[in-house]
Amino acid sequence: MGRRTASARRSSQFRDDDGFPAALLIGLQAAVPLHILDSWHLSDEERQAAANEHATVVACHGDDLIYGGRQCAPSFNALARGLALLAHQPGGVDFAGQHWCTQPHDGCPNKRTRPLLPGIHDRHQPEEVNGGG
Ligand SMILES: [Zn+2]
């Protein structure tokens, strides 16, 4: 019991204000943009079907994602992929204080002026990247 409490206390030092593990947030910052690029070619119907599948995985194994467990990696991938799919929706998606989107919209906290990755442009205003000389 004491050992577990010490472990919980130690792990709480690596969580954000909402209790999400810092490693999860860092991982999402890297993974979600890659999944956005990988899901670019899908139709809206394909994205919706895939998002439903990933939501089921997160719902069933979200505890492993937060506290560790055998399904941690699959649930992380499902969360990252699901957030990427939702980023294609108007207004994008917010999770754990982060925001991902693929189209310009009112109130967007992303003031991105560069492509998601070199040579790969998103649907934000391209004139900010290419214009102005
Ligand atoms: Zn946005």
Image (spheres, rainbow, N blue to C red):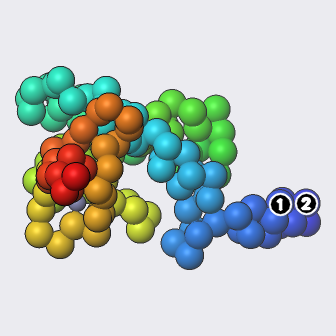
- Secondary structure type for disc 1: helix
If the picture is divided into quarters, which one holds ligand 1? bottom left
Relative horizontal placement of residue 76, taking residue 3 as reference (left or right): left
Tell me the amino acid under the disc marked 1.
Ser
The numbered mark at residue 119 is none
Relative horizontal placement of residue 131, taking residue 116 as reference (left or right): left
Q: Which residue, given by chain and number where applicable, does mark 2 sit on?
A: 3
Task: Kindly identify the residue that appears in the image at 17 percent across and 72 percent down.
Answer: 107
- Secondary structure type for disc 2: helix
> x and y percent of residue 68 in the render?
66, 45
| Total marks placed | 2
> x and y percent of residue 123 in the render?
16, 44
Tell me the amino acid under the disc marked 2.
Arg
Q: Residue 17 or 87: which is nearer the viewer?
A: 87
Q: Residue 11 or 43: which is nearer the viewer?
A: 43
In this view, 79 is above or below 124: above
Q: Residue furthest right?
A: 2
Residue at mark 1 to residue at mark 2: CA–CA distance: 6 Å
The image quarter in which residue 71 lies? top right
Quick check: can you spot residue 46? yes
Please state, as top left, top right, bottom left or bottom right, where the N terminus lies in the image: bottom right
Q: Which residue, given by chain and number where applicable, does mark 1 sit on?
A: 7
In this view, 87 is above or below 75: below
Task: Kindly identify the residue that appears in the image at 30 percent across and 58 percent down.
Answer: 112
Task: Kindly identify the residue that appears in the image at 16 percent across and 25 percent down.
Answer: 42
Query: Are the residues at dot 1 and dot 2 in contact (C-beta closer than 8 Å)?
Result: yes
Relative horizontal placement of residue 21, taking residue 61 as reference (left or right): right
> x and y percent of residue 111 in the render?
29, 64
Q: Residue 45 or 2: which is nearer the viewer?
A: 45
Task: Kindly identify the residue that appears in the image at 17 percent across and 52 percent down.
Answer: 131
